[in-house]
Image: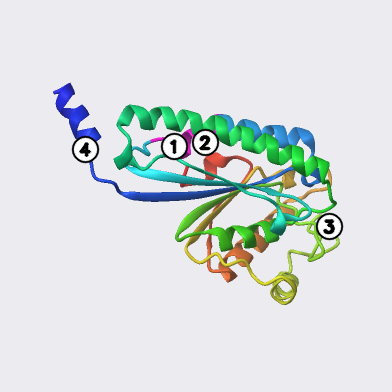
Amino acid sequence: MTAWLLSLALNLPFVGVKEYQILVAVGCSAPRYVQNNYRDMLTHEILPQLLEGSILNQVRLVLAPITGRSYTAPARVLETPHPLQANRFQLEQEKKTLVQKALRAFDELRKRAAAECTRGTEIIAALKAAGERARGPGRILVLAHGFEQSELMNLYDYRLKLERYEVRQQLLKRVKERLGLPPLKGQEVCIAGITAGQDNNANARLTTSIKAFWEELIAASGGKLVGYGPSPRLCPFL
């Protein structure tokens, strides 16, 4: 029976390519301890889950930084072998190798972002770049504190009155006019690593309003916000 199951596993049909993009706040866009927390999430929660049960699929992983210049920031692309070009044992080994490659890529991107440190956190620009990179329907995981701080807006400004629908709509209008909405059609977006509620000046109204803003921006961009919170465990595609 074991031999039959092994033979079946080695000869199952190829299902397709699963594309994931992970956008991580690094450099001046997040404190060092927050970046370390994101790296731990990648190591123990995100990457193992993305690669779990991927025997029938090829996984394409794009890792990109969120910085003060997100749109032009470099990205790293990692892929597992085509399942029909490798046996199960080779695929398992490649999955382990991909985790180590992804962590090295994260460290390289973080080092570069620190060297080219610019003020600001361009989450919207990072989403725009991710949408343009997408080859089709995919999943985008954003590891960021939730505060867009760019020429477009500063969500860290507690005087913004973001709880007002008309304020959020005015900000969306500004995005359309100055940058253009991210092309997120067919993309599921999950924002994790949120630290907005940990700020001493934060309150429930502000943190709820920030979530509403991201929901409205992603929906207006053709995508869907499927998870939002401090932990990637809230992301249904993990």
Q: Secondary structure at mark 4?
A: loop
Q: Is residue 51 magenta?
A: yes
Please state, as top left, top right, bottom left or bottom right, where the N terminus lies in the image: top left
* Relative depth, front residue between 234 and 78: 78
Q: Quadrant of residue 193?
A: top right
Which residue position holds label 1?
Answer: 51
Residue at 21% across / 38% down in the picture? 11
* Residue corresponding to mark 4: 11
Q: Earlier in the sequence, mark 2 or mark 3?
A: 2
Callout 2 touching callout 1 (CB < 8 Å): yes
Among the two numbered marks 4 and 2 on one chain, the one whose residue lies closer to the N terminus:
4
Q: Which residues are magenta?
A: 44-52
Q: Residue furthest front?
A: 85
Circle 3 residue: 158
Vertical relation: 44 (above or below) 189:
above
The residue to which callout 2 is attached is 47
| Residue type at tag 1 | Leu
Which residue is nearer to you in this view: 87 or 210?
87
Which kind of residue does numbered mark 4 sit on? Answer: Asn
Q: Is residue 20 above or below residue 158?
A: above
